[in-house]
């Protein structure tokens, strides 16, 4: 499973309507892979969590998967539409 699929799997299982989530890789350079997550404004709170706990846990899991597979560092940007 690649990093975008893993991120999508984790976030789509948090929200009530998985169609309200868009995830894509927007950049890759020598050091980082950047993944952009777009969610509907109504579910932004459930994706971020209290004090950012949920999105930080997702970032940790995706980064751990990247390290385990010998990949680059990962940045996950989240925004609403």
Image: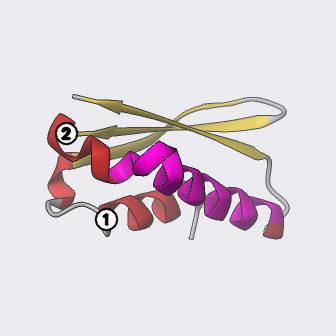
Element carrying mark 2: loop
Q: Position of residue 75 (x, y in %)?
A: 64, 38
In this picture, is 73 found above or below 34?
below
- As drawn, the label of residue 4 is none
Between residues 39 and 24, which one lies in front from this camera angle?
39
Q: Is residue 72 left or right of residue 47?
A: right
* Mark 1, other Cα within 10 Å: few <14 / some 14–19 / many ≥20: some
- Residue at 31%, 69% in the rendered image: 13
Residue hosting label 1:
14
Structural distance between the alpha carbons of marks 2 and 1: 13 Å
Residue hosting label 2:
40
**Magenta segment boundaries in residue numbering:** 47-67
Q: Is residue 74 left or right of residue 68?
A: left
Between residues 1 and 78, which one lies in front from this camera angle?
78
Between residues 53 and 55, which one lies in front from this camera angle?
53
- Residue at 71%, 56% in the rendered image: 63
Task: Answer with mark 2 or mark 1, whichever residue precedes in sequence.
Answer: 1
Q: Which quadrant would residue 37 be assigned to in this image?
A: top left
Q: Where the C terminus falls, by quadrant?
A: top left
Q: Position of residue 69 (x, y in %)?
A: 79, 67
């Amino acid at each position: 499973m690649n990093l975008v699929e893993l991120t999508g799997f984790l976030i789509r299982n948090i929200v009530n309507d998985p169609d309200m989530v868009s995830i894509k890789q927007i950049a890759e350079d020598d050091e980082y892979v950047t993944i952009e997550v777009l969610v509907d404004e109504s579910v932004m709170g459930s994706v971020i969590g209290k004090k950012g706990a949920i999105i930080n846990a997702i970032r940790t899991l995706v980064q751990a998967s990247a390290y385990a597979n010998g990949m680059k560092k990962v940045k996950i940007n989240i925004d609403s539409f």
